[in-house]
Image (cartoon, rainbow, N blue to C red):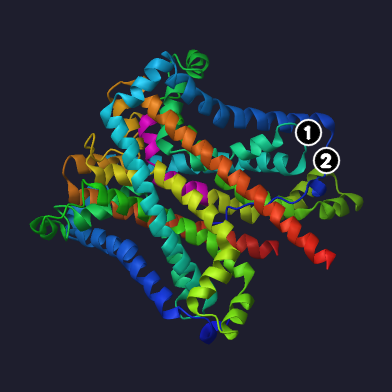
Amino acid sequence: MSKSHRVLPGFALSLGYTITILTAMLVLPCVALSIKAAALSPAQFLAAVWSERARSTYALSFGASAIAALLNVAIGMLIAWVLVRYDFWGRRFLDALIDLPFALPTAVAGLVFSALLVRNGWYGQFLIPWGIQGAYSRLGIVIVLVFVGLPFVVRTVQPVLESLEGDTEEAAAMLGANRWQTLGRVLMPAVRPSLMTGFALSFARGIGEYGSVVFISGNMPFKTEIAPVLIVARLEEFSYAEANAIAVVLILLSLTSLAVVNWLERRSRRCAS
Amino acid sequence: MHPSSMRIKKSAGAMVANEPLWLRALLIGATFAIIGGLIFVPMVYVFVQALADGWRSYFDNLVKDKDTLHSIWLTLSVAPLAVLFNTVFGLAAAWTVTRFKFPGRTLLVTLLDVPFAISPVVVGLMFLMLFGMQGFFGPTLREWGIKIIFAWPALVLATTFVTLPFVARELIPLMESLGDEEEVAAVSLGANPWQLFWRITLPNIKWGLVYGMIQCNARAIGEFGAVYVVSGHIAGETDTMPLRVEKLFQEYNNPGSFAVASLLTLMALVTLLGKYVLERWIAHQMAAHQADVVGE
């Protein structure tokens, strides 16, 4: 690669173009938002971002995203395992369907889940008599976040499972390990980093998610209001400075949690290798 | 940290199925239940709801509503613009990052992931703070008579931001694994940059590029949060299809909302089909290539 520094053409042009676009499209908007948020005095900023209503939205955004990401790790691992290891009728079809949440607009997901979970919907007619309120509840938020995040876990774990080939497991079995020992000592260490990546991607997507949640949550302050919804609510009241302040906090919180997960992931990758 | 999403399947030789039959049946059954309940049934339900009043009113909901027609037209023009922009950007970024070493290279790759970490609503807000009336350039732009916010340029900008990494993220691992030997050879044989791109680089990466463009397009069509903030919800002017779905839903027009949603679902299914065909095609090409190598 070092050789090509001189040989291949277009370094100045492509680097210049890339940096220009990144600056104009990414850095400039971020800076604009920060400056506008900085116009508030520290006391005003704190009042905007740490009100009781704001705190409840952070708790819900992060809580629901974490629960959904954990659920996705569990069912994503199961699905990836079944799709990689077993051959059965309909496997290809299921495998193709996994990508649907990537391709389907999230607004459609929110719309259809809210229709499924209300009293006369296909799911609601069975769930609501049992007292399970899917639509306009926190449960609904978790359900759509599971839908939106599932492919992230499946698609990161699948290639790792495919590359394992099974010979290490066979070796473990021959050396006398039972199925559970093989799972815990051979499979999990190999798969763990990719599960963490999947968790991080699903979690990050959940925190930012808006399109699907607005349809299903009912957006009630203190109950089912997530942080992006509060930002939009502040905008619609024309409280731009407050909206900016909450946005800055949301960005910082999600970047911090991503950095933590990245660090954990790197550490477990080091342990695995 | 975002993995390349293109998946070239290996042959089924690596399958180990030494679990007892009952456990296998249980796991496979659970997979059918989860994917069925979480993905397949909701997909079917979109069409069931859209067609609840019959085909006649389904078509009426789509064709006779001027605002809905406009939203379809708007989505089908905003998404390709974002894809075009991000294709050029993706090519430039991937070329820079995979073919040259320079200080700050890692930072550049990290920056590419930032749009994944920012909520689309915040993205919309950022553009509002740049080009809106409360923003830095808003008043000046108004003097000049240029409308960005609450008009289609803002839709394109917001959609482009959200989909910025898609093509680059697909190309970087691909170009890294291809290496630069062929390109260096072409240059030393006297190829000019134009020839280098069209005869060597593009033919090598074309399927990965198409794959990235398909993904970028799907995300661009579905973008909601960012365009929600910058569009101003003007029916017949700045409502894209996902925004139209929301507006009809708010107006308690369920059949209308699901009719638009069904079109979006059809587009998603076309995307899936395109990806599937492309993955099969590339696997086929690779198998043919390997057979060639063995044959020699």
Q: Is residue A206 magenta?
A: yes
- Please count the marks in the image: 2
Label 2: chain letter:
B
Say whether residue B240 is left or right of residue B32: left
Label 1: chain letter:
B
Residue A234 image position (x, y, % from top left): 22, 42
- Residue A54 drawn above or below residue B207: above
Circle 2 sits on which residue?
Answer: B17
Circle 1 sits on which residue?
Answer: B24
Residue B135 image position (x, y, % from top left): 17, 56
| Foreground residue among B142 and A64 | B142
Residue A245 image position (x, y, % from top left): 25, 53
> Residue at left 76%, top 43%?
A85
- Residue A125 drawn above or below residue B143: above
**Boundaries of the magenta span:** A201-217
Secondary structure beneath label 1: helix
- Give the prevailing secondary structure in the magenta stretch: helix
Q: Do the residues under discs 1 and 2 have CB atoms within 8 angstroms?
A: yes
Does residue B100 appear in this view? Answer: yes
> Given the image, on which type of amino acid does mark 1 rest?
Arg
> Given the image, on which type of amino acid does mark 2 rest?
Ala
> Residue at left 23%, top 34%?
B235
> Residue at left 78%, top 38%?
A87
Residue A246 image position (x, y, % from top left): 28, 50
Quadrant that contains the C terminus of chain B: bottom right
Say whether residue A13 is left or right of residue B45: left
Q: Is residue A160 magenta?
A: no
